[in-house]
Amino acid sequence: MNFWQGFAVITVAHLLAAASPGPDFALVTRQSLVHGRRAGLLASIGIALGLSIHIVYSAAGLAAVIAHSVEWMTAIKMLGGGYLIYLGVRGLRATPAKCDDRSKPGGEPSSAQAPTLSGSAWRQIGGGFLCNAFNPKAPIYFLALFTIVLSPDLPLATLAIYGVWIMVLQWLWFSLVATVFAHNAIRGRLLAMSHWIDRVFGVAMIALGARVLMSVRDV
C-alpha cells in the first residue's frame, strides 16, 4: 500500500470512527450546549491531542501487546471506566447555567467569545485530553488501523504525517460538532434546559463507565 492509498484509508476509517457516538462526542456536545462554542472547541483540541498517546504507543508496536495483555487491558478499562464515571458524577452535580448566558443581539452566546487562554481554558483542553486518552477501546481500534495501514517498518516521516493527520481529522470533526451544537438557533432553545443536559450527560457517562468496568471480567 503506497502513501496515498494509506492516506485515503486512514481518512475514511478515522472519520467513521470519530463520528461514532461515544464519550468524546458526549463531552463536546455537552460543553458546546452548556458553555458555548469556545468550550466545545477547546475540548475538541484536547481530544485531538489525546490521540497522540494512542498513536505513539501504536507506532512503537505496543498496541498489540496492550490489546492482548489481560493486565494492561484490565488497567486501561479500570482507569477509563473510572474516569467516565467521574465525568458523569460531575455532570449530575453541576449547577444550572445563569440566564444571562444567552446570545447578545447580532452575536454568539457570551460564553462562546474567545478571551485569552486561562486556567479554565486549560481545564477544558485537559478534560478532552483525558477523555480520549482513557478510552479503553482505543488500543483495539489503533491495533486494527495500524495492522491494515501502518507499521513500525514505515519511514518515520510517513508515520508522523499519518499520526498528525489522524489528530487533525479528529479536531476537524469535533470542531464541527462544537460549532453545530453551539449555534444560536440550537443552543438558544436548549440553554434553558442546560441543567437537564448536564443530568443526561451525567447518566450517559456513568452508564458508559459502568459498562466498561463490567467488561473487565471479559478480558
Image (cartoon, helix red, strand yellow):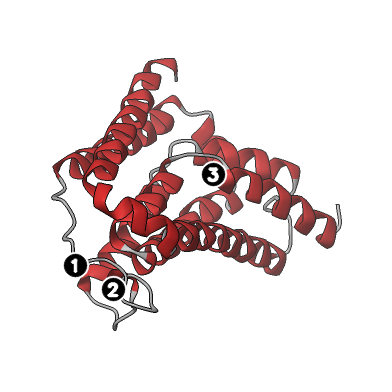
Up-down relation of residue 108 to residue 175 (above or below):
below
Residue holding disc 3: 62
Q: Nearer the viewer, mark 1 or mark 3?
A: 1
Q: Name the residue nearer the viewer: 52 or 114.
A: 114
Question: What type is the residue that disc 2 sits on?
Answer: Ser
Q: Which residue is mark 2?
A: 110
The relative height of residue 213 versus residue 36 in the rendered view (above or below) is above
Residue 66 at what x, y percent from top left?
49, 36
Residue that mark 1 sits on: 100
Residue at 76% x, 58% y: name it. Answer: 7
Q: Residue at x 67, y 61 (%)?
A: 162
Whether residue 23 is visible to the viewer of this picture, yes or no, is yes
Foreground: 177 or 155?
A: 177
The location of residue 154, given as percent across then percent down, is 74, 58
Residue 166: x percent and y percent? 61, 58
> As rendered, which of 165 and 93 lies closer to the eye?
93
Quadrant of residue 122 in the image?
A: bottom left
The residue that appears at 38% across and 27% down in the rendered structure is: 212
Q: Residue at position x 69%, y 46% from top?
A: 13
Return the mark for residue 29.
none
The reply to whether callout 1 and callout 2 are in contact (CB within 8 Å) is yes
Residue 71, above or below 100 = above
Quadrant of the drawing holding the C terminus: top left
Crowd band around label 3 with a 10 angstrom C-alpha radius: few (<14), some (14–19), many (20+)? some
Amino acid at dot 1:
Asp
Q: How many marks?
A: 3
- Is residue 157 toward the left or the right of residue 61 in the image? right
At label 3, the amino acid type is Leu
| Quarter of the view holding residue 83 | top left
- Under circle 2, the secondary element is helix
Kindly state the secondary structure of the residue where label 1 is placed. loop
